[in-house]
Image: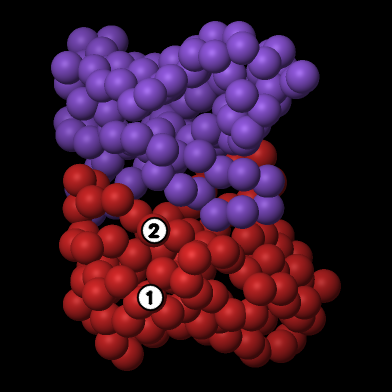
Amino acid sequence: RKEVEQDPGPFNVPEGATVAFNCTYSNSASQSFFWYRQDCRKEPKLLMSVYSSGNEDGRFTAQLNRASQYISLLIRDSKLSDSATYLCVVNGNNDMRFGAGTRLTVKP
Amino acid sequence: ETGVTQTPRHLVMGMTNKKSLKCEQHLGHNAMYWYKQSAKKPLELMFVYSLEERVENNSVPSRFSPECPNSSHLFLHLHTLQPEDSALYLCASSQEVGGTYEQYFGPGTRLTVT
């Protein structure tokens, strides 16, 4: 089983759509969780941390389910600029483990 | 953004060459990382440094040799690479080692081994 597993997509959605990504992780001792965004041919950048109680940042909502070991990201009212690859990241001991990413394309 | 810089941005080298990748962070961070990103694969953590001391080496072949002379600079020395080593090499830094800290990435060096 991969340490961090994501649906690779691609997800192709129209502007204004709501889209959700899921991510599962194998290490039950993981403590910290993040979503990063990576644009084509660019470096990854932190989108948001994921807290146990769930958290929201504008159109983005992240949730954590420790019992089932999965993390989700919900994007509401998609914009063209949301097109990117979304990386699920889980903390190990001294390091972070990245998923392979889910590619999102938002179309006019 | 110039928080983490990497040079060169692109590198083509033969299997018998020796080259070095350079990373510099201007954020005052204490931890630095090297990652490898291959097409359609997750980022693979290669090395972790905390205050110039290597704290993790994820079974990386010896043809990759890291060097951290101070907390702002990180090098990756390359020699006798294989074509399968062609990838994007990303450097990152964080305030401290540990997963609660955001990692800031450089733009990467796209390496092609011929």
Q: Is residue B106 above or below residue A30?
A: below
Q: Which mark is residue A41?
A: none
Q: Is residue B103 above or below residue A32?
A: below
Q: Is residue B70 above or below residue B37?
A: below
Q: Is residue B107 left or right of residue A105?
A: left
Looking at the rendering, in which quadrant would you find the C terminus of chain B?
bottom right
x then y, percent, for residue B97: 21, 60
Look at the numbered disc 2 and give the secondary structure of its residue. Answer: strand
Chain of the residue that carries numbered disc 1 in the rendered image: B
Q: In this orientation, which residue lies closer to the viewer: A104 or B84?
A: A104
Q: Are marks 2 and 1 in contact (CB under 8 Å)?
A: yes
x then y, percent, for residue A4: 42, 30
Q: Is residue A22 above or below residue B9?
A: above
**Residue at 51%, 24% in the rendered image:** A6
x then y, percent, for residue A67: 21, 11
Which residue is label 1 attached to? B25
Q: Residues within 10 Å of mark 2 (few under 14, many from 20)?
A: many
Q: Colour of chain B?
A: red
Among numbered discs 2 and 1, the one appearing first in the sequence: 1
**Residue at 25%, 75% in the rendered image:** B28
Q: Colour of chain A?
A: purple
Q: Is residue B3 left or right of residue A16?
A: left
Which residue is label 2 attached to? B104
Q: The disc labelled 2 sits on which kind of residue?
A: Tyr
Q: Quadrant of residue A33?
A: top left
Chain of the residue that carries numbered disc 2 in the rendered image: B
x then y, percent, for residue B80: 66, 81
**Residue at 27%, 81% in the rendered image:** B71
